[in-house]
Image (cartoon, helix red, strand yellow):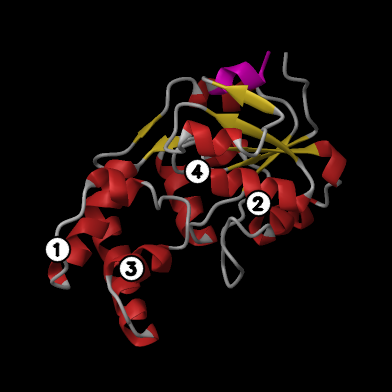
């Protein structure tokens, strides 16, 4: 039984949204245009939740900061152009957020503006008291976005639980000093998630409601 928390911090991709088709599709288009050899969907999906530049650095040796910036801009344009056609909510997400008590924020690698747009598109924005993205701060697995979300809510560490699907989420939550809840339906490797010994595990977001 998972206790009720005063504050919930949510990852987005792989936790609330199954967005890999659009994210990986946009990434694949950028890499192909840059002349990179094809990479698998599974490879691209393994980078979801991390800084986009980590993917580009892993595929393109000796890439410059200027090239990274251009590829990132092209990715953003390609991703927006897809208009979430391949993205959908995971089962139970809408129902859980509608009835889950406590205050809620995001803690995502997306930009804050991009997060607000995607939450509004899928009809979830109304359920959040605060929206926090990784604007000018280190991305997960660093704890910065978690700390920023907590500060944005004016919350106490002991009142918070971070809900996410990736090892980066678990590491960030542990570093921030909050409880961590792993969702088992997302993109994270189960063995890697287990290494962080999550306080809770769920296979459906409605399990948070009890």
Task: Write down the residue under mark 1.
Answer: 37
Decide: marks 1, 4 in contact (CB < 8 A)? no
Q: Which residues are magenta?
A: 205-210
| SS at mark 1 in the image | loop
The numbered mark at residue 12 is 4
Q: Give the mark, 3 or 2, whose residue is nearer the N terminus.
A: 3
**What is the CA distance from the residue labelled 2 to the residue labelled 4?**
14 Å
Rendered residue at 80%/33% (across/down): 6
Q: Earlier in the sequence, mark 3 or mark 4?
A: 4
| Residue at disc 3, secondary structure | helix
Q: Are the residues flagged by discs 3 and 2 in contact, CB closer than 8 Å? A: no
Mark whose residue sits in front, 1 or 4: 1
Residue 164: % across, % down: 57, 38
Q: Which is more N-terminal, label 4 or label 2?
A: 4
Helix, strand or loop for disc 4: loop
**Closer to the eye: label 2 or 1:** 1
**Residue, disc 3:** 56
Mark 3 touching mark 4, by CB under 8 A? no
The x and y percentages for residue 193 are 56, 36
Discs 2/4, front: 2
- Tell me: residue 166, above or below residue 100: below
In space, the residues marked 3 and 2 are separated at their CA atoms by 22 Å
Prevailing secondary structure class for the magenta stretch in the rendered image: helix
Mark positioned earlier in the residue sequence (2 or 1): 1
Q: Position of residue 69 (x, y in %)?
A: 36, 79
The residue mark sitting in front, 3 or 4, is 3
Tell me if I can see residue 83 in this picture.
Answer: no
Q: CA distance from mark 1 to mark 4?
A: 29 Å
- Sequence order check, earlier mark of 1 and 4: 4
Q: Residue beneath label 2, please?
A: 172
Please indicate whether residue 159 sits to the left or right of residue 59 in the image. Answer: right
Rounded to the nearest angstrom, the CA distance separating label 3 from label 1 is 12 Å
């Amino acid at each position: 039984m998972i206790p009720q928390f005063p504050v919930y911090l949510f990852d987005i991709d792989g936790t609330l949204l199954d967005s890999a088709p659009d994210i990986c599709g946009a990434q694949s288009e950028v890499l192909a245009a840059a002349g990179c050899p094809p990479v698998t969907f599974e490879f691209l999906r393994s980078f979801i939740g991390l800084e986009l530049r980590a993917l580009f650095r892993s595929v393109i040796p000796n890439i410059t900061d200027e090239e990274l910036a251009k590829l990132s801009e092209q990715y953003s344009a390609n991703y927006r152009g897809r208009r979430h056609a391949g993205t959908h909510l995971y089962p139970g997400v809408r129902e859980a957020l509608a009835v889950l008590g406590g205050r809620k924020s995001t803690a995502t690698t997306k930009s804050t503006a991009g997060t607000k747009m995607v939450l509004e598109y899928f009809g979830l924005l109304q359920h959040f008291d605060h929206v926090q993205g990784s604007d000018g701060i280190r991305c997960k697995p660093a704890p910065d976005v978690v700390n920023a979300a907590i500060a944005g809510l004016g919350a106490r560490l002991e009142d918070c639980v971070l809900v996410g699907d990736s090892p980066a989420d678990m590491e960030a939550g542990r570093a921030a000093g909050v409880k961590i809840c792993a969702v088992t339906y997302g993109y994270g490797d189960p063995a890697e998630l287990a290494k962080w010994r999550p306080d809770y595990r769920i296979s459906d977001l409605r399990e948070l409601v009890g």
